[in-house]
Amino acid sequence: MEESPVIPWNTVLDLCQALLAIDDVWIDKTAAGEDYYWRDVRLSIARLIKIGLEDPKRKVPSELLLQVRGILLKLVDDPDPDMDSDRPPTGYMGHGDPITVALNHVRPVALSALIEYAWQRHRINKDVLTSTNNNADHSDWKRK
């Protein structure tokens, strides 16, 4: 089995932040003559960060989690899906299937990643608290 590639998270997150700071990235029209939408770029950013939070082999280092949080907070306010794509008509992909809609739009993927981020922070804080309590000197505690 092939090893997962190491992701240079510092560089990746800096690039994601730089992209999301560009006003045109939030407009859902194709670039002149191009075959992509900026929505797809934002969705890829959300999916990549989700991988970095879920896959232990590609894990975002804990010191970069605040940067991840900032990016995800921008993406959970994404205009995608709009009202039409959130409720596709009969015959279109995702009609009557909210899971398919959620998997293919920026805001729900970013929210899912933000929930995973919160879980990561909880585990880190729990580990720090447990470690601190285990190393504390409680010799002055008395049983009543």
Image (spheres, grey):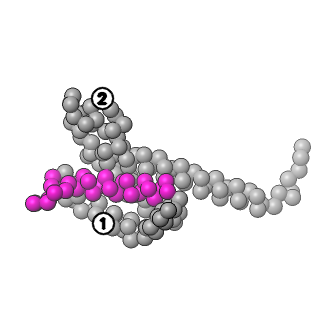
The region drawn magenta spans 29-55
Q: As rendered, which of 125 and 105 lies closer to the eye? A: 105
Q: Which label is found at residue 2?
A: none
Q: Is residue 43 magenta?
A: yes
Name the residue beneath numbered marker 2. 96
Name the residue beneath numbered marker 1. 18
Q: Main secondary structure of the magenta part?
A: helix
The span from disc 1 to disc 2 (Cα, nearest Å) is 36 Å
Q: Residue at x 44, y 56 (%)?
A: 51
Q: Is residue 31 left or right of residue 16?
A: left
Q: Residue at x 50, y 62 (%)?
A: 1
How many other residues sit within 10 Å of disc 2, few (<14), some (14-19) or many (≥20)?
A: some
Count numbered badges in the picture: 2
Q: Is residue 38 magenta?
A: yes
Residue type indicated by callout 2: Gly
Residue 28 is at least partly visible in this image:
yes
- Dot 1 falls on a residue whose secondary structure is helix
Asked if residue 90 is positioned above or below residue 1 in the image, the reply reads above
